[in-house]
Amino acid sequence: TTLNSDINPKGILFDLWGTLIYNVPRYKREEYEPIARRVGRPAEEIWKKWVSYAPDALRGNLKSGEERALKVLAELGGPTEVAPAMAHFEAENLSGQVHFYDGVPEMLKALRKRGYKICLVSNCNYLTPAVVERMGLPDLMDELVLSCQVGLVKPEKAIYQLAAKRLGLTTEDCLFTGDGGDGELDGAREAGCRVALVAQERGHAFRFPQKVYPYDIWLDRVTDLLKFLPDKAPQISAA
């Protein structure tokens, strides 16, 4: 973990889940059984149908868990009154107990103090904007790009380009840092960013080590990024 003089970005684009924060599920899978009985279908069938709506949720075409539940119930012929319980289960399980990885707020403050511009770039659904607010991330970052709000998803080039533009930079000025889910590192590199792979516990690369991930920097913990970057960011020229 030493300074790489070849990597000298003006901006850092951060993935969210598995990189800066993680969630501890509240429920076990079998605790979904009472809901499945009310729907009148096996839990696995309901989950499969629920997952099929993930792309729409990530792009912001579905605005809530209840809206998603109603679509699933319509397809499966289940009673609409179960929708609130289905939405509550998802919210509690996926965003009910969210934590920063150790040292993340301090790292973000240190990076900004060094003069780096920081933007969040997250593939996320309707649950995440409230989590972002709750965790105080708007005060720790310069910009936020959430897929469900901008209608773009990683690994599409456009989402990285949008993030860089919001920072007043180009993608070539930026280092993308993430745990490798959704092909985000490949997308970032194709968009022109340098990339740092975060291989910490609970993250995608940690859970799927057999995959091949592109990277310019390997981080065992996201906070190790501070060791790789200069103490002072390059000057950002005025437009």
Image (cartoon, helix red, strand yellow):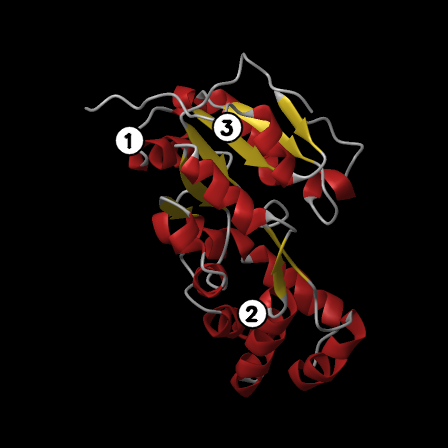
- From the viewer's perspective, is residue 208 above or below residue 133? above
Indicate which label's residue lies in the foreground, 1 or 3. 1
Label 3, label 2: how far apart the Cα atoms are: 33 Å
Residue 29 coordinates in the image, percent (x, y): 77, 70
How crowded is the residue under tag 3: few (<14 C-alpha within 10 Å), some, or many (20+)? many
Amino acid on which the number 3 mark rests in the picture: Ala
Residue type of the residue flagged with mark 2: Val
Q: In terms of depth relative to the viewer, which is nearer, 69 or 176? A: 176
Q: Residue furthest top?
A: 6
- Secondary-structure class at tag 3: helix
Give residue 94's position: percent from left, percent from top: 62, 64
Q: Is residue 230 visible?
A: yes
Q: Position of residue 199 (x, y in %)?
A: 71, 37
Q: Position of residue 33 (x, y in %)?
A: 76, 79
70 in relation to 17, above or below: below
- Determine which residue is flagged by label 3: 188
Distance from the alpha carbon under mark 2 to that under mark 1: 41 Å
Residue at coordinates 43% horizontally, 48% vertically from top-left? 147
Q: Which residue is mark 1?
A: 168
Mark 2 surroundings: few (<14), some (14-19) or many (≥20) residues within 10 A: many
Q: Residue at x 51, y 40 (%)?
A: 14
Q: Is residue 128 left or right of residue 235?
A: right
Q: Quadrant of the N terminus?
A: top right
In this orientation, which residue lies closer to the viewer: 21 or 189? 21
Question: In the rendering, which numbered label is found on residue 72?
Answer: 2
Q: Spot the residue most to the left.
A: 239
**Cα gap from disc 1 to disc 3, whole angstroms:** 17 Å
Decide: is 172 above or below 131.
above
